[in-house]
Amino acid sequence: MQVPVTVLNANTKREQGRKAQVGNIAAAKAVSDIIRTTLGPRSMLKMLLDPNGGIVLTNDGHAILREIDVSHPAAKSMIQLSRTQDEEVGDGTTSVIILAGELLQSAEPLLERHMHPTVLVRGYTRALEDAIKVAESMSFSIDTNDRSAMLQVVQSCIGTKYTSRFGSLMAELALDAVQTVARDVGGGQREVDVKNYAKIEKIPGGTIEDCKVLRGVMFNKDVVVPGRMRRRIANPRILLLDCPLEYKKGESQTAVELMKEEDWAALLKAEEEWVAGACAQIVALKPDLVVTEKGLSDLAAHFLTKAGISAIRRLRKTDNNRIARATGATICHRIEEVRESDIGTRAGLFEVVKIADEFFTFIVDCKDPKACTIVLRGASKDVLNEVERNLHDAMGVARNIVVDSRLVPGGGAVEMAVSRTLTERSATIEGVEAGPYKAAGQALEVIPRTLAQNCGANVIRTLTKLRAKHAETPVGTACPFGINGETGEIVDMRAAGVWEPLVVKTQTIKTSVEAANMLLRIDDIVSGISKSRAAGGGPSGPQVDDHDNVDPEQMLPE
């Protein structure tokens, strides 16, 4: 009899074959079930306690999953999906998780019939290609200059959120912000960098109605010498620097040996002369405001105050970039190289305002600013955080429409149309791929089914009616009927004005199918102790550290 050979460490845990696949499917389903009730306008909220003791109250899929700590590797992979979706299109984070979980659940009966995962993946991939074609055939373009149409689309996309009770306020803020930062890059393409150039500033206090988009920039800073520098300047000339206005300090410890007292005076004088020279070069350009990312010494502040120039120091790099884009200024790296063309002149007003206990600097009324700040006001930090999350989704939708103006019907209409098409086409597919192809189509019905569940409608009757509506439509014709998430009735989404950007829908389907394919192809999970030794046990023998595996926390044996 052959002696069994142990290759892996005794502490290593290993799951193989069917057990690994079933475990992955169960983990993915558990994650999708967590946020299933947060889909649609009648969605429920989740209350989460973060590690610092704060409370997160939200129905945003990405925000919920970001706060949840999971240990299963497949569940971690699912949570990564919502982050990818959020970064890519900014919306559809809940749908992508629900759809991926349902695709994996649909694969389970096929795996039990001993279908090979590779065949499953091939069928799913084929279904994905056809699903994208069906979604694109249902799309139509919108005029991005038609403000009312754009508002309606953004409003329907954030109708499921907490802020939908405040009317069209969030949609207007998002649209204003995106249209402010959008710029043409040639070739019919438009660049919308919301992340870097549309800053959201949350100030507790006031009411939600006080939220607004500034035509310029705002940041939490005051002038260097509050009593003597001007806090309000109309049509200011702005100079932006990212070099210090103080005498250079040594990189590390610097020792200067002085033999005479006069040498000390000469050293101080040299410092003063350098600062005076730098300030003189700045004053020669006649700016009204100097902003630097680095330090600004008291002596430099004195010279600038004498010249009637206001100054702000230690500003964030990102804020400085926004000021540069809004005012037309160029950020200078050396004072000697500053030119007249580097001065920003597009700002209409510089003003420092005290809100509550803090001072905020406004550089507003800019001519054609390509950067903006969205000021959010609200009763508490929890409310503001939720408003910020909703606004982020709304800006994502507005950005998607500006970049790609194609829309599709919402309310599960696209998923139902794709499901019907895939189910019909599966009859024409030969071989074993027909099973997973049809299963992928049926899995897409989870979106309208969940919408019906969340608003308390009779799920079986509602879905049967919706299937019948889509079956009545001639093949090749787009059926716009979906579920009204408020009442659970079957309605024409065109008449209801519920639209979604095509790019969000296609990204949702692509991401969920590709994630399901990836998890289905896993047939072995090995988890064990690799580099770190078991708790409490010191090094088992003499160890040689190369430069890659040095552990700074390792305790040396006494």
Image: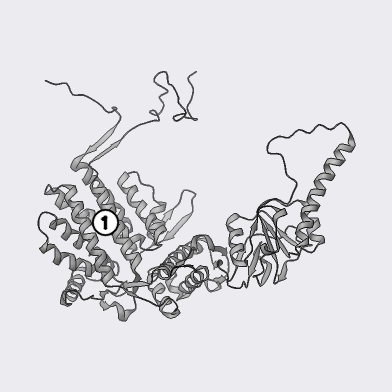
Side of 391 where 467 appears, left or right: left
Q: Which color scheme is applied? A: one colour
Q: Callout 1 environment at 10 Å: few (<14), some (14 to 19), or many (20+)?
A: many
Q: Amino acid at mark 1?
A: Val
Q: Is residue 99 left or right of residue 89?
A: left
Q: Is residue 452 visible?
A: no
- The local secondary structure at tag 1 comes to helix
Q: Nearer the viewer, residue 183 or 219?
A: 183
Q: Is residue 136 visible?
A: yes
- Residue 168 occupies quadrant: bottom left
Q: At which x and y percent is residue 352? A: 69, 66
Q: How many marks?
A: 1
Q: Residue at x 52, y 70 (%)?
A: 180
Q: Is residue 24 above or below residue 479?
A: above
Q: Is residue 364 above or below residue 342?
A: below
Return the x and y of residue 114 as percentages of the image width and height.
12, 47
User: Looking at the image, is 27 positioned above or below residue 137?
Assistant: above
| Residue 242 spot, x, y in % from top left | 65, 53
Front-most of residues 459 and 276: 276
Quadrant in which the N terminus appears? top left
In the displayed structure image, the side of residue 193 where residue 246 appears, left or right: right
Return the residue at label 1: 513
Residue in the image at 42% along x and 72% along y:
164
Q: Quadrant of residue 269?
A: top right
Residue at left 21%, top 24%?
Answer: 5
- The spot of residue 522 in percent (x, y) is 24, 44
Residue 304 location, quadrant: bottom right
